[in-house]
Image (cartoon, rainbow, N blue to C red):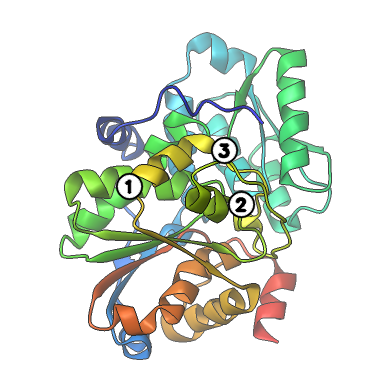
Amino acid sequence: MSDKAESSIPTFQDILDAQKVVEKYLPKTPLHNYPALDQLLGANLRVKHENYQPIGVFKIRGGINFMANLSSTERSVGVITASTGNHGQSVAYAARLFNVPATIVVPMESNPVKVEAMKSLGAKIVFHGRDFDDAILHAEHLAEVDGVRFVSSGNEPLLISGVGTYAVEILEDFPEAEVIIVPVGGGSGAAGVCLAVKSINPKVMIIAVQAEAAPSAYLTWKNRRPTNAQMETSAEGLATRTPFMMPQRILWQHLDEFILVDDEEMRKAVRLYLEKAKTLAELAGAAPLAAAIRLKERLHGKKVVLVLSGGNISPEKLRDCLS
């Protein structure tokens, strides 16, 4: 997997620059309080609704910032990336916005809802491999063969600075926040949160959460070295078996804590969001609520933000959560 981790680490200024770009195309997403969730957890909660984005996920911010910064030559030639769905939708949406040809390589057994969404946005879809990491290797190969720009979902500073804009919004709307819980797949979202929040208010505690059944980012953060792991979670937004090192360098420096939750905890959190907040979360998006439930005693009485990163759940997985 390509690794740009040693160069071009984004800064807080990059996030502020990205905010000027992103706000031209996207309204600020809401930060809502739900008394039923407050009562459940004994905390003062806010939910950052990135599931309300046009493509239902936070990654759209990074895609727009990336495309906005391409040269005219790069835009005319096009881009290619690999995705389980959400990153691909981000690239496809932004590519359509800036008239850039886009190809998305997806694993053979990808979420059909997300694949259809990418197609509807005009992207060319290539099916390859059994999982995300297989798709990445194929996309990198095609990028070399076709001479187009490969867009890494993790090791790309323009994506990290783009998605970091939602963290700035959080502290604009809720400056008294004490804890922010953010899900981690590749780690771009958590890295963006760390860069923004620790620059604005270093006292805010940032907790990352990943799936127990796909813990490569957690193990890499814990071991302070690249660590591959199994990838058996149903939460495709958290399903990586090889870590992205650019986000990890940022997490190593700024992240306060990293925990794991199992798939059943995430399914329960999807149900709770439907019941208590009348909102739809995919498993990855529900992971911070699952983590908050696990950390309930420690979070008691605190001002906590849960990042609901996305709501792109397939009907089959939603039925599984509700059964």
Q: Is residue 164 visible?
A: no
Which comes sooner in the sequence, label 1 or label 2? 2
Q: Upstream in the sequence, badge 3 or badge 1?
A: 3
According to the picture, the residue beneath numbered tag 2 turns out to be: 216
Binning the other alpha carbons within 10 Å of mark 3 as few (below 14), some (14 to 19) or many (20 upward) gives: many
- Image quadrant holding the C terminus, namely bottom right
Toward which corner of the image does residue 18 lie, by quadrant?
Answer: top left
Residue named by callout 1: 254
- Residue 114 vs 301, above or below: the answer is above
Alpha carbon separation for disc pair 1 and 2: 18 Å
Q: Amino acid at mark 2?
A: Ser
x, y percent for residue 162: 39, 38
Residue 73 in percent (x, y) is at 55, 9
Residue 318 placement, left or right of 5: right
Residue to which mark 3 is pinned: 153
Disc 3 residue type? Ser
